[in-house]
Image (spheres, coloured by chain):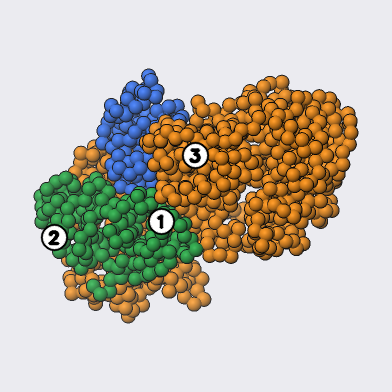
Amino acid sequence: MSNAVTALNGANYQGLATIADQGLTGMITLRGDLASAGIKAAVKSATGLDVPAQRQALMGQGTAALWMSPDELLLLCPYAEVAERLAGIEAALKGQHFLAVNVSDARTFLRIFGSGAREVLAKVCPVDLSPEGFTPGMFRRTRMAQVPAAFWLDEAGTFHLICFRSVADYAFELLKVSAQPGGEVGLYA
Amino acid sequence: MSTRLAKGGRLLDKGRALHFTFNGKRFKGHAGDTLASALLANDQMLVGRSFKYHRPRGIVASGAEEPNALVHLGEGARMEPNQRVTTTELFDGLSCTSQNHWPSLDYDIGAINTHLARFLPAGFYYKMFIHPRPFWKHVYEPFIRQSAGLGKATNPGDPDRYEHFYFFCDVAVIGGGVAGLQSALAAAEAGAKVLVMEQTAHWGGRAPVDGGEIDGQSAEDWITATIAKLRDMPNVTLRLRCMGAGVYDHGYLLGYERVNDHAPGTDAPRHRLWRIRAGQIITATGAIERPLSFAGNDIPGVMLASAIRDYAVNYGVSIGDRTVVVTNNDDAYRTAITLKKLGLEIPAILDARQSGGGALAVEARSLGIRIENGKGIAKVKGGKRVTGVAICAQAGEGAVLEEIKCDAVAMSGGWSPVVHLWSHCGGKLLWDSAQAHFRPDPANPPRGAKGEAFVVPAGSANGYLDLAGTLADADSAGKTAAKAMGHDPKSTKAPSASATDEAALEAVWLMPQGANIKLRMKSWLDYQNDVKVSDVQLAAREGYESVEHAKRYTTLGMATDQGKLSNINGLAILSDALGQPIPQTGTTTFRPPYTPISLSAIAGAARGPVFQPIRKTPIHGWHEANNAHFEPVGQWRRPYCFPKGEETHRDAVNREINQTRQRLGMLDASTLGKIIVKGPDAGKFLDMLYTNVMSNLKPGKCRYGLMCNENGFLMDDGVVARIDEDTFLCHTTTGGADSIHGHMEDWLQCEWWDWKVYTANVTEQYAQIAVVGPKARETLAKLTTDDLSNEALPFMGWADLTLSGMPVRAYRISFSGELSYELAVPASLGRALWDALLEAGAEHGVTPYGTEGLHVMRAEKGFIMIGDETDGTVIPQDLGMSWAISKKKDDYLGKRAQEREHMADPNRWKLVGLETLDGSVLPDGAYATAPGHNANGQRMTQGRVTSTYYSPTLGRGIAMGLVHNGPDRMGDVLDFPKVDGGIIKAKIVDPVFFDKDGEKQNV
Amino acid sequence: MLILTCPCCGVTGEETEFHQGGEAHLKRFGPGSTDDDFHTYMFAKENPKGAHFERWRHNNGCGKWFIMARDTVTLEVYGSYPAQTHEPPQHIRDAITAKRPGWRWRDFA
């Protein structure tokens, strides 16, 4: 699969924060009864992680389990391993009502880091991005200017953001404008 | 003469000179000046002409309430009209010009209107320009358009940038005067997260100018100390140059931050719009001094008493050597005392109150100032500048007692709390007759999402006009707000302040109270809109009794200042004319923004490349590199065609179609919606969604289906593939991907929530490429060892293939009538597959085609297109698609609706093909006429064109349309009138124009 | 601009994250129903001055539909609850009663 490319093909911008294409990442939409033992086993097998709580992002080694809705998770894993991990999920949930599907290519996946990261996002998302308002491990689906997006924060202070692939250019340009030097608000930096 | 004083100017940095120009004249000011103070320091009192009569107008105020001094600020693309000089900070190189005059500020031809004022009363334009009707368009409108409008707009694009910022806090304090600071401190000390915004560049508001002591310190020192305290608190955010623009539902607050208006040329955004959600909002917005209504009160040099004081104390500017003070309250005495102490002359204080003032009057008298109680101004003398005043008894009709020479008049009619932000979201007002103003009614505050009061007024904005009262009220407001947010305020005491013994104000709405009509016609209420006392009285006489009607009739309180100075005076005059108390008249509605904010700030970053999202397929880059002519399809940009060399779009479309039908074409179909529907009840669910049966589709097979809404109308169509027993993949139209997914989730979540079905929208997971034409199979065969035979992969079947090492799901479906494979590949490989197919198809002259080629080919085949043949009023039965409607099913969405009488009416227009007799192309949307006329005298119609194209395959125009009894009238000829008056004749034919038996696609 | 709380994901967000979807607690009338019943179901919607029940979707969020009880006059929100119910829960009714004693909305009170 050496021909596979992300929509942004490794783009990177450094301003008040660094906006960077995360590159190809395996993503699996998993829908089912999140309280069930089967889902717990499936998430463990695919990511090595527990089932995240409401609006939680759990991060592992090259994996993550993200709470999308009361019956939906997004699981992250290495791009090349999706088929294998999907098979594990199917095995864990055999006979149960669930849906697991590869969506690794449906999204644009960005990292936003640096001292201005919170302000860069606060210019485009109607979410409290103050240090007390948004803490590591939180997962938030929302609106980023005119497109839907979701992001979470890790312990190192890096924001991870996903939006649909077709609006990759828009999302990247928007964050670039937001991170343009001179636009420091001076609150969270 | 106005001039710079040798001493004073607390806000100035006299060591830093700044140069600027006004109407091309070079002037010098200092860092810390506003444009207003710098103009006045250079004796530029005359700054503009009034809107209607073109009277010379000078600066009246020192803040946001300024009605007159609006200029064109900046040059070229950065020129902006209607900028208030009082709120514009001076910077080096500033250039501005005055507005509303021709040919020049000093000699303005429009000023003739002032001599015609007698003939231009309120409502003049309404009355004058009604008859004769044709005159409106050709004479009146062009004339009015030329003279209407404040200032001029610019044409070039705005070179600056703008942004939004979302912010959340417990308590937002609007106003950084002492009330704002004390309420912020009280709330923050209780633990609340607090934002304080101040519209000017300085903290403290009026207090440093008005004087007084707080906790034994000067006001200025207390402000400095309080700011330092607030700065040290991690839960406090302080913003200068940030105006509270509007208060909206549920604690939404707009802050308008002018980031670099005062320092253009830096790389900062010019304005930042703060989109704030505050649990509680404290409006510490201060109060505005009212003018007095006397004849000639608009002559340059007549100013608000507080403004004259501001210019003297803050900017070291004297408005004149001899200033007459005229007042109905004690506060104006502060101006007299301040000026006198600066060594300027106060020829007289005219106090309209018979009993005169309190302690401040005593102090003024002790400074040797002449005070005349019970007196007022009969008339101001002067043209472009005050030269003197004629004094009269306030109780009389204007008989002149004495004339006094002066070059400035300081007037004060009392103070009105700034209740705008309290009122924006529904806060009600009380009339305070003692202070003659409206103030917030604590029993009727704006209420939020939980029904709670969420705006708390503080200080003078709440009617507390003395320092001690202001501080106590602000302290309590801060604690109230913090408490409402669940914090526990400490029982601290409010700062104490020295009190001044002031005599009560006496309301004066007209000076003198019995002023005759000649005087009233020169007594201005609204400077910006040239509304006089006589105009409001006329409106009342003519029946405009509601304050909202009177506003629109007279224009009182309109335009950029929205009547900040004029409203109360105007409605007092109206009340008097109607013989009713002021509260019964009420106020006009206060609407956001508080002062005008830039449209660019509202747009924020949404301009240029991020004006709106443009959705792009994984193959978009190839399209761009190969001269695609794009068309918008929702937010997508899809290639319409790919012109080569000198080709027209039509040439390109024809070439693309011919090549596809004869050999090989390729289409980027990635935008088609793809939704996975999975679960034990998936088949049952799809049977409800589609009009035909999907549950009996075999795995590995595809079926075309129609979707109707509950009202019976066709809303989407597409091919469903059954992946396995539990799983279906539903293709939707490009526009339907999100809405149909939403539609499915709606029914699953809200109606059939016990059905075991999950959906996932995988539209963007795949790039989808249609390989179309007689050479399609051999081309694919070059890339795979998989079996592509008609037996292994028949028409309306699908199979997983490996093409050039890439995992591909191939659907044998056709929207063109040709042998066709739609290949779905992970989006990240979309471009790689496209390139591989181009290479493989090169020997057959593979030709990418666009949406127009797609449309023409489907029309040649008589396939419908959602949005062309449908418009939200068309049912499948109209389109001859009864074959796609299951008779066996008890129910599907839309079934009940389609049983209604008018849905089964045989007179509904039905789908047919249309062939022009002369081979030309019918205009899109053209109607077929029928004999007779309807009640409106319009031609009767019997059908309309829904799709129309030139078919290169048939070498003629083809069309589809909905026609009355159409399918039963094959061969009939219809008339389609054209816009230019001609008629095209077209014959009703079968809608399938090409390959009626489908032999080409099924090979 | 309203603030809404999604009962499905717990987010309290501004109106731009949500999409209003008309009246809640509609009873569907399909094939076999009378013209009157069908007409009422499709077209006759409540337009109260006071408490109202609306469907909302958290479309820029968890994607779930929910029902919100809201006052059309004061814009007060009495509460929101998941869509998988045929009637408003008691605590929502109580919240409305506290502000609008004697309220009625279709069959609910």
User: Taking the image as drawn, is residue B467 in sight?
Assistant: yes
| Most foreground residue, B298 or B726 | B298
Q: Which chain is green?
A: A
Residue that label 2 marks = A87
What number of labels is visible?
3
Residue B394 occupies quadrant? top right
Q: Which residue is mark 3?
A: B183
Q: Is residue B165 above or below residue B810?
A: above
Seen in the picture, residue B299 relative to A20 is either above or below; the reply is above
B602 vs B279, nearest the viewer: B279
Q: Is residue C77 left or right of residue B151?
A: left
Quarter of the picture containing the C terminus of chain B is bottom left
Instruction: Give the residue number, with chain letter if any, for mark 1.
Output: A188
Q: Alpha carbon of mark 1 to alpha carbon of mark 2: how far?
A: 43 Å
Q: Chain C takes which shade in the image?
A: blue
Q: Chain of mark 3?
A: B
Residue at (23% x, 66% y) in the render = A79
Q: Nearer the viewer, mark 3 or mark 1?
A: 3
Dot 1 or dot 2: first in sequence order is 2
Residue density around tag 1, few if under 14, some if 14–19, many if 20 or more, within 10 Å: some
Q: Please provide percent x and percent y for residue B522.
A: 81, 36
Query: Looking at the image, do the residues carrying marks 3 and 2 touch, with CB atoms under 8 Å apart?
Result: no
